[in-house]
Image: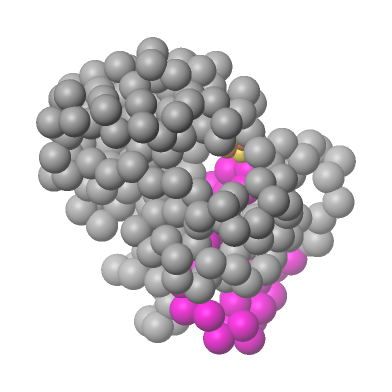
Amino acid sequence: MKVVEKFISINGEGTRAGELAVFVRFRGCNLNCSYCDTMWANEPGCPCEDETPEQIVSYIEETKVKNVTLTGGEPLLQKEMPELLHLLAEKKDLRVEIETNGAVDLSGFRTGEQSVFTMDYKLPSSGCESGMLTENFRFLEQKDTVKFVVGSQEDLDRAGEIIREYGLIGKCHVYFSPVFGKIEPEQIVNYMIEHRLNGARIQIQIHKVIWDPNRRGV
Ligand code: SF4
């Protein structure tokens, strides 16, 4: 598996935001979002370690950190991901979060009670909405999350449409996250108030507040 970095930090977002997590970032992505902050990891020539699923699990266990975040790039593009998820599912004390971009079919990747998906729905300002697989909404459970990364009013309006059309609130967690530097968080809150989006949440990426927004490995 192509691992570009692995490190311990805090979860910057998601349902376990603020808790310790061990991150494994995989190389490559099938999208090209306008605001991508890990584009370097998507380059085919980005330096990486070739690691087996067993080696990755050993590293995770050695850290003694119990939240595991698999990210990228798009982690589900790794050929051996089903095997890695299977091995992680055997470690009952680990809670695995799979960050996925909404453009990969999730069927077949649900492994173990303690694993959750945090799935993006890419909005117009990303330039990648046409890649979204809305069939994925069928596979989501209450413990999973749909995240809308919002960069404009048009994005907010589109997110509202998707939330309503697929009945997302109540089905899973629903988060709004501002594109850093592109939209004032207050505009998102105002939208939530105006549309009475009970059950949805706004979330600011904590790691970008704590560290330099461009810093890697945090
Ligand atoms: S899906 Fe994520 S990693 Fe891929 S281009 Fe978009 S923001 Fe970057």
Task: Provide residue 137's location: percent of width, then percent of height.
Answer: 28, 36
For residue 37, above or below residue 113:
above
> Which quarter is ligand 1 in?
top right
What sort of colour scheme is used for the picture?
A: one colour
Q: Residue at x 57, y 52 (%)?
A: 209
Q: Split into 4 quadrants, where in the image is the N terminus?
A: bottom right
Q: Residue at x 41, y 34 (%)?
A: 185
Q: Residue at x 66, y 78 (%)?
A: 59
Q: Quadrant of residue 4?
A: bottom right
Nearer to the camera, 152 or 167:
152
Horizontal side, residue 19 vs residue 170: left or right: right
Task: Provide residue 83's location: percent of width, then percent of height.
Answer: 54, 64
The reply to whether the magenta stretch includes residue 65 is yes
The reply to whether the magenta stretch includes residue 182 is no
Q: Is residue 79 visible?
A: no
Horizontal side, residue 180 vs residue 49: left or right: left
Horizontal side, residue 63 vs residue 99: left or right: right
For residue 74, above or below residue 65:
above
Query: Which residues are the magenta region?
Result: 51-77
Task: Provide residue 79's location: percent of width, then percent of height.
Answer: 61, 50
Q: Split into 4 quadrants, where in the image is the C terminus?
A: bottom right
For residue 156, above or below residue 5:
above
| Count of numbered circles in the view | 0
